[in-house]
Structure formats: structure tokens, C-alpha cells
Image (cartoon, rainbow, N blue to C red):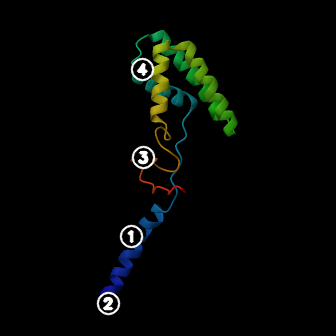
Amino acid sequence: MNYKVYILLFSLVVAPLFALADQPSEPVVRTAEEIAKKQTHRLVRELDLKDSLQIDTLYKMHLKYARMRVKSNTRGEDLERLMSMTEELKGILTEEQYNTFMNKQVSHSPRAGSSPVGPMPQPQGDKRPRRRQAK
């Protein structure tokens, strides 16, 4: 008789929780304005920018490319967009700021400093067996 209560309790309380957990979560959809604001904020923080005109120009540039990103359908379009945005950054940032930006991009890259097959072995002297030379 006791097991019937447990089964009823399980079916009323615990089983619906499993059903809720199995539902896929909704993807976060950001507007172009939110994307541009976040990218500009990150760049201002990383480069310690103070000039409000420069910051406003960066936001407008990020907004333009964020709108392009929302409409983009292919990887080629994304690559073109990123390349042109990087070129446009050269005109907005000083040379020092641009170099700092590029260095941070490389250091944050998932491939930076890593080999696709793992770490390269380091040579440790000549440990190969020597061949006998013919006399």
C-alpha cells in the first residue's frame, strides 16, 4: 500500500520536472543595437578609450556591421564583414590602439599558440642510433 503513495507522489511531482528539463531553451536573440553596444563597451574597456567622439564613431561603426551581421547568411559574408570592419578600425583608432586591439585578437584566438595535432615535441639531443659506416 505504501508503494502506491510513492508512485503517485513521483508521477505528480517528479515526473513533470523531468519533462520541463527536456525542453530546449530558447536561443538568446540580440538586436543590432545590443550587439553594437556590447562590442563598443568591450573595446572601450580593453583599450581604455576616453575620447567621446572616438567612442561614438566606434558605436556607429559597430551598429552598421551588427545590422549586416543580422542579415548575413553565409560564412563568406561574415568573413568579408569582419575584414572590412577591421580595416575601418584602422581609420578610427590610433596606431598604438589598433596594434593593441590586434594583439588581443590574436591572444584570444582559440588557435593561438596551439598546434592542431597537439604540442610539438621538443628535441632532446641526438638520441638516434648511429649507423655503422662501411669500411
Q: What residue sits right under mark 3 in the picture?
A: 123
Alpha carbon distance from label 1 to label 4:
51 Å
Q: Residue at x 62, y 27 (%)?
A: 83
Q: Amino acid at mark 3?
A: Pro
SS for tag 1?
helix
Quadrant holding the N terminus: bottom left
Residue 134 is situated, as x and y percent measured from the top left of the image, at 55, 57
Alpha carbon distance from label 1 to label 3:
59 Å
> How dense is the environment of label 2, judged by Cα within 10 Å: few (below 14), some, or many (20 and up)?
few
SS for tag 4?
helix
Q: What residue sits right under mark 4 in the picture?
A: 47
First-in-chain label (1 vs 4): 1
Q: Residue at x 42, y 65 (%)?
A: 17
> How dense is the environment of label 1, judged by Cα within 10 Å: few (below 14), some, or many (20 and up)?
few
First-in-chain label (3 vs 4): 4
Callout 1–callout 2 Cβ contact below 8 Å: no
Q: Is 107 located above or below residue 95 in the figure?
A: below
Name the quadrant containing residue 30.
top right
Q: Residue furthest left?
A: 2
Q: What residue sits right under mark 1 in the picture?
A: 14
Callout 2–callout 4 Cβ contact below 8 Å: no
Q: Amino acid at mark 2?
A: Met
First-in-chain label (1 vs 2): 2
Residue 8 is situated, as x and y percent measured from the top left of the image, at 38, 79
Q: Amino acid at mark 1?
A: Val
Nearer to the camera, 60 or 111: 111
Q: Residue furthest bottom?
A: 1
Alpha carbon distance from label 3 to label 2:
73 Å
Q: What residue sits right under mark 2 in the picture?
A: 1
SS for tag 2?
loop
